[in-house]
Image (cartoon, coloured by chain):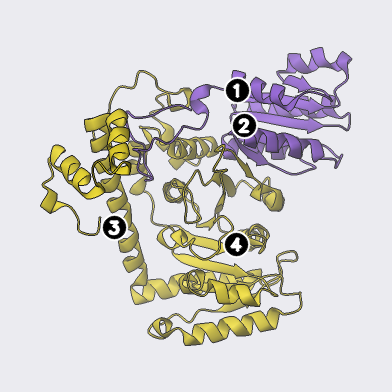
Amino acid sequence: MTTRSDPAAPATASAQPDLVERLLAGDRRALARMVTLIENRAPEARQMLARLHAHGGHAHIVGFTGSPGAGKSTLVTQLARELRRRGQRVGVIAVDPSSPFTGGAILGDRIRMQELAGDPNVFIRSMASRGSVGGLAAATRDATRALDAAGFDTIIVETVGAGQAEVEIVRAAQTVVVVVVPGMGDDIQAIKAGILEIADIFVVNKADRPGADQAAAELRMLLSLDEHRKEHAWKTPIIKTVGMTGEGAPELADKLAAHLASLKETGQLAARDGRQAQSEMLALLHQALIERISATIGEEEWRRLVAQVVERESDPYTTADELASRIGLAPEASHPAG
Amino acid sequence: MLVAKPGLDGHDRGAKVIARALRDGGMEVIYTGIRQTPQMIVEAAIQEDVDAILMSILSGAHMAIFPKVMELLRENGVDDVLVMAGGILPDEDIPAIEAMGVHGNFGPGTPLSAIIEYVKAHVDPQRMRQELSPLRADGPHAAEGSDQPA
């Protein structure tokens, strides 16, 4: 990719050649600004991320997902405190939904993370999903790259309150924690297709409420039915926690460490990293393709082509083939599943 | 946008209404919750890399809290953030508050639209959320050359 001089460079995107060095040296403002550049898709973020990649790979990236109100933020706070007691530096990325109508968002996860305030070895960043589906923001994975390079030992990614299909966290995290609460028996049934399959660790939070044992038992039963899991060395644990008191947080921290060790032992970590690198590269290629088309035909013509398809004057297949050949791709070369 | 509720009063209905109004104005609003110390506000502003801080205060402690916030911002080299306040701010204190670099100072009865307009007028429009072009992949990186500020 060529670096274009950008006459309308945003104020935030003004050239800061030492931003990466400042970030690597532990400057929190540099890290915060880096995340902003990533979120805003600033042109220079790309080169900076390319530089940061070499400095990463040390952090344990832990995803937290579960339905809204399951107590994810409170539990993340308790886990972060436990990890701090163990001498770790902890980064938190908390994703909340953007309004599909105005693009605005209220990011409220910090409210429940106040106990972590003032600790220089904790860095919390809120992030709006900005139209991405799947429980994360498009920038989340790159933001973890920045926190990883900045030397955080564990990076906790909290997804938006998730239901069945928000499984994007699998592509961003090494260990996925799924948080459920008692009294949602039917919901556990409902999540078994999506979220149940991605859990490396189950947490039954609010375990001081009635029904916690039953919820754990139901999870255990669903796990035992999952043929896929029997092949794996890792036996998905079910931990009971009380977010308000921190009960269960040490056990959760133990299991996180055990899961990471298991991933390393079995070669799964390398396999996961490989899958993630692959999906990142495919996403970048996909984007490069779209940029190329954008540069070739522009928005006006794009809209016209879309309208023609809608009006049945043309069809999506022929239009896509024609566009592909205009940017130098033979139609046959297009990906069959694309 | 960081909406913060410094000091000891626990009445944050106003702060929440404003947070919601800013959201409806298309902004991303981090709401900190009540009983924020100046240190917590500045730390959150740094980590979240916000464009503006809006403090809602009813307790009368503004002449103690605002200077501390401004001092901590200076100490941390944060000089590109718009600092605003609203709530119960006596008229005779306003010149001193303005002199500290705290602006807006919206009292009771201020229309929400006035606050949103103020933010939009004073925050760099380039930093406002960018409209996603239909031709932009939902990928993780910048689409060069096709940026369309909202």
* Horizontal relation, residue B141 to residue A29: left or right: left
Q: CA distance from mark 1 to mark 4?
A: 40 Å
Q: Are marks 2 and 4 on the same chain?
A: no
B111 lies above or below A311 = above
**Residue B1 in sight from this viewpoint:** no
Kind of residue sitting beneath label 2: Gly
Residue at which label 3 appears: A278
- Badge number at residue B120: 1
Chain containing mark 2 = B
Q: Quadrant of residue B49?
A: top right
Q: Earlier in the sequence, mark 4 or mark 3?
A: 4
Chain containing mark 1 = B
**Quick one: which chain is purple?**
B
Kind of residue sitting beneath label 4: Leu
Residue at which label 4 appears: A83
Kind of residue sitting beneath label 1: Lys
The quadrant of the image that shows the C terminus of chain A is bottom left
Q: CA distance from mark 3 to mark 2?
A: 38 Å
Eye-nearest disc, 4 or 3 = 3
Eye-nearest disc, 3 or 1 = 1
* Horizontal relation, residue B91 to residue A117: left or right: right
The residue drawn where x is 30% and y is 62% is A274
Q: Name the tint of chain A in the rendering.
A: yellow
